[in-house]
């Protein structure tokens, strides 16, 4: 049936609202995209610390995208004569002692482009963090939005 009792560091940190499969407000199929992201990341990234990734389909934010290390807010993106599913990407959300509202990093990213984008983000974190003790939240808190975009771009370097 495809069910598993094991969840790696990627799947353990995924949160997704019902999305377009069951909610009239959702602009994206969040659960489908979350599973596609997990499959993609598990094939190319080895995380040694949890990173919470929240997919929410609309501004009601049932999956609380603003609280995730990486938050994805579903949207529709105009493309020629069609409307495509996509996301606005947030970073730096947290709760408890590390409470914060995520800040928007990217806007109008087509859903198919999310897996490679998040992989670059996570690789940038792994390559430039202060050590294995530093969380994604702590890492993103050290940088401005502009610097994070440089770090997360292909080959970006922050001075």
Image (cartoon, rainbow, N blue to C red):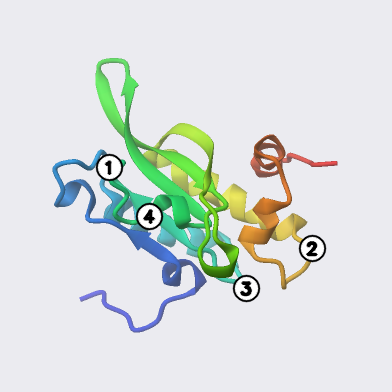
Q: Which residue is mark 3?
A: 48
Answer whether residue 40 is visible to the viewer in this image: no
Q: Which residue is mark 1?
A: 28
Q: CA distance from mark 3 to mark 2?
A: 14 Å
- State the SS at label 1: loop
The percent coordinates of residue 150 (x first, y second) are 70, 37
The percent coordinates of residue 49 (x first, y second) are 60, 72
**Marks 2 & 4, CB-CB < 8 Å contact:** no
Mark toward the start of the polypeptide (2 vs 4): 4
Of the two numbered discs 1 and 4 in the rendering, the one whose residue sits closer to the viewer? 4
**Marks 3 & 1, CB-CB < 8 Å contact:** no
Q: Relative to residue 33, is residue 144 drawn left or right?
A: right
**Number of numbered discs visible in the structure rendering:** 4
Of the two numbered discs 2 and 4 in the rendering, the one whose residue sits closer to the viewer? 4
Q: CA distance from mark 3 to mark 1?
A: 29 Å
Q: Which residue is mark 4?
A: 64
Of the two numbered discs 3 and 4 in the rendering, the one whose residue sits closer to the viewer? 4
Mark toward the start of the polypeptide (3 vs 2): 3
């Amino acid at each position: 049936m495809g069910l598993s009792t094991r969840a790696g560091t990627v799947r353990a940190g995924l949160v997704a609202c019902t999305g377009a499969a069951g909610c009239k407000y959702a602009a994206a199929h969040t659960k489908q995209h979350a599973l596609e992201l997990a499959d993609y990341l598990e094939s190319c990234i080895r995380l040694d610390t949890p990173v919470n990734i929240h997919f929410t389909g609309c501004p009601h934010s049932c999956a609380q995208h603003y609280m995730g290390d990486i938050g994805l807010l579903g949207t529709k993106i105009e493309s020629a004569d069609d409307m495509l599913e996509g996301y606005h990407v947030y970073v730096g959300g947290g709760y408890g002692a590390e409470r914060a509202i995520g800040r928007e990093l990217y806007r109008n990213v087509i859903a198919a482009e999310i897996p490679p984008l998040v992989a670059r983000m996570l690789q940038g974190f792994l390559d430039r963090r202060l050590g294995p003790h530093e969380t994604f939240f702590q890492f993103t808190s050290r940088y401005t939005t502009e610097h994070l975009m440089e770090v997360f771009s292909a080959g970006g370097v922050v001075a």
